[in-house]
Image (cartoon, rainbow, N blue to C red):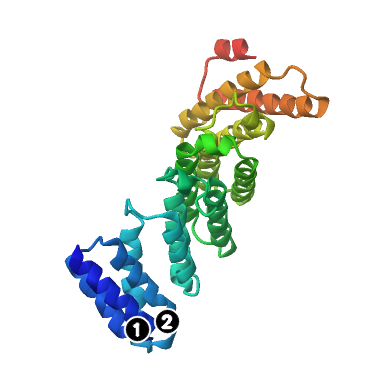
Amino acid sequence: GDAASCWCTAGACLLKQGLLQASCECAKSALQQYPDDLGALLLSISCTADAGQAGDDEKTLILQEARASVGVLRKHRDLQPWQAAKVAILLQPHEDLAMLGLETLATCLAKPPLSEVAATDSVASAANGIAVIRDLVQRRLAKMEPEADVLRYLAIAVELVAARKLEILGKASSLEEIRRLLQTSWDFGQDLGRRSAWASCAAVFEATQRILEPLDPAEDAFASAGFVDGRAWCFILSASARVHQAREDGELLEKALACLDGAHKLCEHINRAAAGADRLLAAGRSKLFLVLVLLEFEVRCLSGDSEQHLRSFV
């Protein structure tokens, strides 16, 4: 509304003059009348840039209001990538808000570009979005934070790939950033397995393979990056983790079989495209198939398949 614009204009001028408290009051007044006004939300967050000059109580209040504004801003349909990037930069000095700022940027980049101009902006590129998500994952892992946060970031990556798959398949930089994210996620899943955290291990590998799900395995760019094999391995390792879980909960064997079915479908695609593959690549795929068969046999034994069924499987 016009009133919100007036409050925001006044607040921006006051902020430039160093009048932090007065600027924050302008943002608060605008948000009281228009809780989802984009300009007012951005002004509220901009106040954090000078929060270090405020007293402890005032600083705490400013950061609380900024956190609330970011929560609304993340869902705002008109938020532009350059605005989200500015928010992420403004919040970096504040440790408890820095991750929230980066997540806001990643969420914004997970949407299709609103215009052709935005589509050519490096800030708004899919590659940058994947890089931001990888940064989020690595920061969480460095702090040994709960894997629930990591799974949430990987879910954002799934949305980003689904929304911008044509751009991703057409740019080597995007495929390279996906490869780096998958490697980070893969290493984390392996670490969880070594710690016998089977439920979390399975969840991470399942989330990792979902990142690749929107991409067509028949695309040359997808296959040449090794993503078909990588996704098949994620299915297998997720199934393996479910098998370990199933020793305590038999219902999870169905989930393991579902993962193995996904791996089988990818192996069928690999076999159809295997003509002309070099020996090293062929050996790797032979190992993949062997592990798949052995694991499936174990799952079927544990699930109580009849001896006759098992003989036909062999």
Residue 45, picture quadrant: bottom left
Camera-side residue of 246 and 198? 198
Which quadrant of the figure contains the C terminus?
top right
* Residue occupying image coordinates x 78% and y 26%: 283
Q: Label 2: how many residues lie within 10 Å, few (<14), some (14-19) or many (20+)?
A: some
Residue at (61%, 47%) from the top-left corner? 177
Q: Quarter of the image containing the N terminus?
A: bottom left
Residue type (three-letter) at the residue carrying disc 2: Asp
Label 2 residue SS:
helix
The x and y percentages for residue 66 are: 35, 71
Assign a secondary structure to mark 1: helix
Q: Where is residue 310 in the image (x, y as percent from the top left)?
A: 59, 15
Q: Quick check: 295 above or below 54?
A: above
Numbered-mark total? 2
Q: Position of residue 130 (x, y in %)?
A: 55, 49
Instruction: Using the image, determine if residue 61 lies above or below residue 40.
Output: below
Tag 1 and tag 2, C-beta contact below 8 Å? yes
Q: Which of 67 and 41 is in front in this view?
A: 41
**Amino acid type, callout 1:** Leu
Q: Circle 2 is placed at which residue position?
A: 50
Q: Which residue, as the protein is rendered here, is positioned at the far front?
A: 117
Residue 189 position in % (x across, y down) = 59, 47
Q: Mark 1 points at which residue?
A: 20
State the residue at coordinates (53%, 45%): 204
Tell me the quarter of the picture where residue 9 sits. bottom left
C-alpha distance separating marks 1 and 2: 7 Å
Q: Residue furthest right?
A: 279
Task: Look at 42% across and 60% down and name the residue there.
Answer: 83
